Image (cartoon, rainbow, N blue to C red):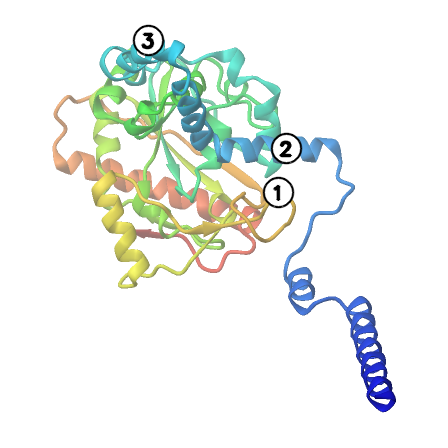
Amino acid sequence: MDKGNDLTALSRTISASSLRGRLTKLTGAPLRPVAALHASIDFVPTKIPRKRRLQMMVVAVWSVLLVMSCFMFLVLCSIPALWPFLVMYLIWIFCIDKSPAYGNKLTPWFRSLKIWQYFAEYYPASLLKECDLPADRPYVFGYHPHGSFVSGALATFATEGESTGFSKAFPGIKPHLLTLNNNFHIPLYREVIMALGISSVSRESCSNILSSGPGQAITIVVGGAAESLSARPGTADLTLKRRLGFIKIAIQHGADLVPVFSFGENDIYNQMPNEKGTTIYVLQKKFQSMFGFTLPLFHGRGLLNYNLGLMPYRRRIVSVIGRPIHVQRCEKPPLEEVERVQRMYIEELTRIWNTYKDEFAKTRLRELSIVD
């Protein structure tokens, strides 16, 4: 019995020693998954200037504003006392309010809030003006490229920060950035974008705004959803050859066409490989055909790191506003005239690229390409 007790005590001692040794090794070296995580993710330092934190928070809130609006509306729906008001609000949105087709909700003080300055400074985003635009006529701005989030278009044509300041650069011109009509069916979110001067991209909306007087301007992101699928850093593949609608609208209203090329728009997100023929590409095109828009599978940085998340990277965006192409007004322009103006438009857009590519697109992987 004594030998058995001694053996048991010895095994306990060995087990305790072994356990102590293993714990020592664990405390001396981090676990492999944790070490790998720290090695692959570039975390944000603890000490960051307050201004940069504000810039990051504004961009983060804007990135999830649509989802937040839907969530807030659902929270309001959970309060029975508010149901009559919410029903009236929905009737107003879907049946009565025609503001998205007229652009008459633009609110100058809201566009000039400090938060939009932080939004533009995050990248930073700025505009470069090539020439004056007289306010005695309407304008159609064609914005390129679409990118994943059209952040440059928002900063340039829907806000009035010091770094962009569209109204100061072009006094007398009232810009309206256009987006899909579906966005104006989202409660609360629609009120924010309308206050920024954002309107529907429908033909009716374009005609109403351009016909409302001199100095009125619309900005159309020409490439649309199709172009967003090819948005990758270092590239500039523009979906433009078969896009004639915005040119026809400009001719019908005698509006000067102004090409805008936004250097850096494609650089703020990385996108998963989705070449034609891949499963991802097929699914994205199917989604586009069903809902009118598509969802690029992109990734950027996070709130607490620099290389993993859904926030855009801090990369400079410079929107170059080129020289206007004057057109003669014609209510029913022939196809030949529309194509002639399109060639002039593409030539001006190409000139902008060739003039500024070595300054604003130093890391480009290939040259400008005009695709379907």
Quadrant in which the N terminus is drawn: bottom right
- Tag 2: amino acid: Gln
Residue in the picture at 52% in, 15% down: 110
- Tag 1: amino acid: Leu
- Report crowding for label 1: few under 14, some 14 to 19, many 20 or more residues within 10 A (C-alpha): some
**Residue at which label 2 appears:** 55
Residue in the picture at 14% in, 28% down: 333
**Residue at which label 3 appears:** 84
Q: Nearer the viewer, residue 323 or 313?
A: 313
x, y percent for residue 227 = 34, 47
Contact (Cβ within 8 Å) of mark 3 with mark 2: no
- Report crowding for label 2: few under 14, some 14 to 19, many 20 or more residues within 10 A (C-alpha): many
x, y percent for residue 325 = 33, 30
Q: Is residue 126 visible?
A: no
Q: Nearer the viewer, residue 129 or 101?
A: 101
**Residue at which label 1 appears:** 303
For this orientation, the residue located farthest to the front is 1
For marks 3 and 1 on the same chain, the one whose residue lies earlier in the sequence: 3
- Tag 3: amino acid: Pro
Q: Nearer the viewer, residue 241 or 256?
A: 241
Single out the mark in the foreground, 3 or 2.
Answer: 3
Residue in the picture at 69% in, 65% down: 35
Q: Is residue 313 visible?
A: yes
Residue 295 in the figure: left or right of residue 150: left
